[in-house]
Amino acid sequence: MKSEGNGMRCEIISVGTELLMGQTINTNAADLARELFSLGIGVYYQTVVGDNEERLAEVFRQALSRAGLIILTGGLGPTEDDLTRETVARVLGLPLFRDRGWEGRLEDFFNRIKRPMASLNLRQALVPEGGKILPNDRGTAPGIYLDLQEGEGPLIILLPGPPPEMLPIFRKQVIPLLRAKLQEKGALAVLQSRVLRVIGLGESELVEMIAPLLKNQSNPTLAPLAKRGEVHLRMTGRGRSEEEVQTLLEGTAQKLREVLGDYIYGEDAEELEAVVADLLRAGNKTLALAESCSGGLLSHRLTNIAGSSAYLLAGLVTYSNEAKMHILGVSPATLQEDGAVSAKVAEEMAAGACRFCRADIGVGITGIAGPGGATPQKPVGLTYLALAAQDFKFSRRYEFWGSRQDVKERVTNTALHLLRLYLLGKLKSN
């Protein structure tokens, strides 16, 4: 059986022309990969192939040459274009036999729904020689488990395509079989991941900073994943117990913290706005927001957190110059001389929000989200962010990129990053 280290090398083959045409989203491969990961089984390849016998045979032969576990989903229905079981049997040189138990289940099913059973449905009771039926409680196509050469060849698992049928069969029946197989071979492992979330660095800059760790990685492995406005560092460890893996992961996390410091804002599912909210609560600080180009998105992100009324006093979307002047007290002279998109306007917006709401901290955001409204001097994505507090003033120019939504999300990410640094005492006034 092909393996890597102590693990089993897996390939997932998704069968269905509708997947290739984009008419159906291939959620099965993602669901299976997550379930296999929990067993310490690595998915090395994922292939999608249409309802074509020769192309499916070609893909299956390739999988036989490189994987110890092959899982095929789809193509187990009763019609002529459902070719998976027949193609697998032909490539393996195995005869098909009719499973009388499943044939009886099919007959009972059609009797219960008071419909005649078409002869085509009997194809769903066919099993390659040596295969084991995996009963389907939600449909007429069973799964099939095939262990070749008494464990020395690959494990082959055929599963129905509809996710509500596929996933329960895999979880309830396949996982126990795989766990037993891994235990038998002494290959049962614990595989876990942790994610460190990084803000304020681009992916290439981050990779340069942690280059020695990336170069020398083994267990755990380390992978940077670029997200919109931030980077996630995924650590994946393998061991014989959960405690062993957690120790390995924490060791790598500590090395990353030593290099990246305050650029790491959280772990796993921890969101940036939740981290900022916790800091505001812990410091007993109140906040007022004055947004222009972000259109209230920063307010939206913070108010998505339960209990945000404890620290957020107001979110003001002062889009027009008139609103900036009349609500926030931005000087008409500043607007005239520097323009609405400028550091001085952002500073006056932040100070005005702070004053208007009697908040401890004010944030001002002004910029050009695009796609229109730009000039050669002020391109799309140009944004000024400002923070104001007692005896504290900060502003900075940024140039973001992407679509209008991309710019808005990057703007609010950066504003939250600056807020976090301020609350940690790491942002200097200018």
Image (spheres, grey):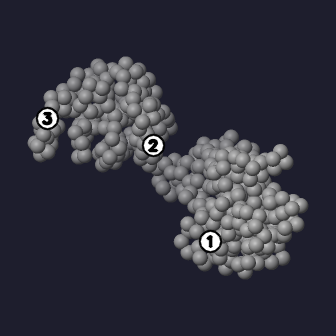
Give the camera-side residue of 267 and 241: 267
Above/below status of 360 relative to 266: below
Residue 351 seen in this snapshot = no
Q: Amino acid type of disc 3?
A: Met
Towards the viewer: 13 or 214: 13
| Mark 1 element type | helix
Of mark 2 and mark 1, the one earlier in the sequence is 2
Residue at point 72% right, 80% down? 358
Q: Position of residue 293 (x, y in %)?
A: 70, 58
- Name which residue type carries label 2: Ala
Between discs 2 and 3, the one toward the N terminus: 2
The residue pinned by badge 1 equals 278
Task: Give the distance between the C-alpha atoms of the residues marked 2 and 3, in whole angstroms.
Answer: 34 Å
Rendered image: mark on residue 30: 2
Q: Using the rendered image of the protein, determine whether residue 301 is visible from the camera's viewpoint.
A: yes
Q: CA distance from mark 2 to mark 1?
A: 33 Å
Q: Mark 1 packing: few (<14 Cα in 10 Å), some, or many (20+)?
A: some
Residue 260, quarter of picture: bottom right
Is mark 2 in CB contact (under 8 Å) with mark 1? Answer: no
Q: Amino acid at mark 1?
A: Asp
* Residue at the spot of label 3: 117
User: Where, by quadrant of the figure, is residue 219 drawn?
Assistant: top right
Q: Mark 1 or mark 3, which is nearer the start of the sequence?
A: 3
Write the residue at 42% across / 28% down.
49
